[in-house]
Image (cartoon, rainbow, N blue to C red):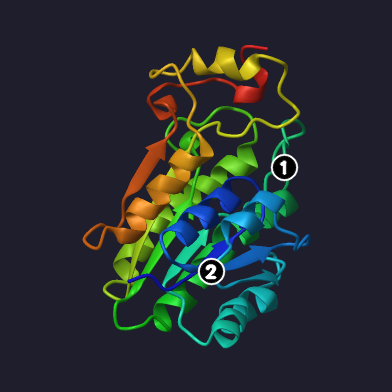
Amino acid sequence: MAGLALVTGGCRRVGAHIAARLAKAGYDIALHAGHDPQPEPWLVEALAGRRWHVFTADLSDAGQVAALPGDVVAHFGAPIDVLVNSASRFAAIDDGGVAMPDVMAHLSVNVAAPVALAQAVAEAAGTEGAAIVNILDQRVANPPRDQVVYTISKQALAEATRTLAIALAPRARVNGVAPGLVMPTGDYAEGQGDRLAALMPLERLASPQEVADAVAWLVGARSVTGQTIFVDGGAHLKSFERDFVHLAR
């Protein structure tokens, strides 16, 4: 029996595909946005027939993070059954070393907010408990030398996933999904995605639907906690010196 799912960063890109997949599974959807609360048009169509609402919160603001779960519960009149921490801060800081303000900015959004939300959802979970899925990155297994601050924050969230699985049991199950390159941005050259796919052990890149399917599986896997599923064409099995945007150009 489905219930209510909160997907942070759920209005755009991979987060939107996750929200659509959970709606297909029968969940009502609370979409979180950091600043632009307009979901992609295709997502609005995919949510037809389900109750859904967009909530805006700055995940670097402790007060707004603390208020978000309560706002969702008050709006829907039901506890949050599923939390997907998909929102992420990514800044391509490659030169000049690692500055403490940059580290703190990434950790607040990519680690502190997911941890706080997970704790709040677990504490208020219904009798069936809650399912929490953190969206990681395949680079946590073999980090490149680029985007050091972002990588560190995702590695921290990966370890937090294991620790929260212990700390929040049995009220909540906590797992992770680590995608590889899924939706190349405009920074990628024409044909670069195909050339990168050829570098993967499976010679393919994952689709956002495959990432969403992995999330949905973990949500329904009642005996699974503390696990991370890599959805990346096998990228985590290889060591890439640079971020994908710099390769096969």
Please tell me whether residue 12 is drawn above or below residue 200 in the rendered image. Answer: below
Q: In the rendered image, is residue 16 in sight? A: yes
For label 2, the residue is 50
Q: Which amino acid does label 1 sit on?
A: Ala
- Position of residue 199 measured from the top left corner of the image (x, y, whole percent): 48, 14
Please tell me whether residue 235 is drawn above or below residue 58 in the rendered image. Answer: above
Residue at x 56%, y 78% (from the top left corner): 69
The disc at residue 91 is: 1
The secondary element bearing badge 2 is classed as: loop
Question: Relative to residue 215, is residue 74 drawn left or right?
Answer: right
- Position of residue 8 measured from the top left corner of the image (x, y, whole percent): 59, 61
- Position of residue 101 measured from the top left corner of the image (x, y, whole percent): 74, 54
- Extreme residue toward the front, this view: 49
Q: Quadrant of the C terminus?
A: top right
Residue at x 70%, y 32% (from the top left corner): 185
Question: Relative to residue 14, is residue 204 drawn left or right?
Answer: left
Residue at x 53%, y 69% (from the top left corner): 50
Work out whether residue 186 or residue 47 is closer to the camera in this orientation and state it.
47
